Amino acid sequence: MADEVTKLDRVLLSAKNHRALVWVLLAAIILIGVGQVSDALTRIGQFFRPQHSEHRGDSSRGDAERVAALTSIRRLGIPFTRDAFLDATEKGRYETIKLFLQAGMDPNVRTPDS
């Protein structure tokens, strides 16, 4: 037990002799703690942030939106094809493009030439 007290006394004496080092270590410990708290708060915030239904695993809403968009495209007499989508983009038909994307068309689709 006497050795343990002696070691503690040496550490305390060393700390008195190197106050700047102690302050730097203390600041580092505080900053690490603040960083961990900040990360934790970010994660908590992400938990409460509203997410799209597909990310929550509730795909019924997403499926209903896709079906509604496909129905609207069919009512307009437009086939749900890559060529029809590209035609809508070339002509700047915003509402039609929006329907295609909601129905599940890949926004990165390309013509056979590109």
Image (spheres, grey):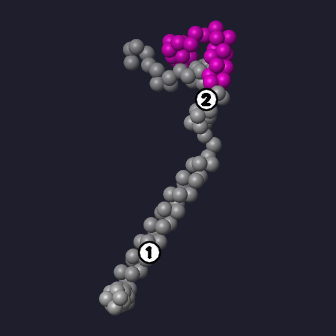
Task: Kindly report which numbered mark, 2 or 1, lies closer to the viewer in this rendering.
Answer: 2
The crowd level at tag 1 (other Cα within 10 Å; few <14, some 14-19, many 20+) is few
The residue closer to the viewer here, 43 or 11, is 11
Question: Mark 1 is on which residue type?
Answer: Ala
Q: Is residue 98 visible?
A: no
Picture quarter containing residue 89? top right
The quarter of the rendered structure image containing the C terminus is: top left
Picture quarter containing residue 85? top right
Q: Give the CA separation, mark 2 to mark 1.
A: 48 Å
Q: Which mark is residue 62?
A: none
Looking at the rendered structure, the secondary structure element under dot 2 is helix
By secondary structure, the bulk of the magenta-drawn segment is best described as helix
Residue 60 lies left or right of residue 13; in this view the side is right
Residues rendered magenta in the picture: 63-91
Residue 80: percent from left, percent from top: 56, 13
Comes first in the chain, label 2 or label 1? 1
**In the image, farthest residue toward the front:** 1
Residue under label 2, please give it: 59
Whether 39 is among the magenta residues is no
The quarter of the rendered structure image containing the N terminus is: bottom left
The residue closer to the viewer here, 75 or 5, is 5
Q: Is residue 86 visible?
A: yes
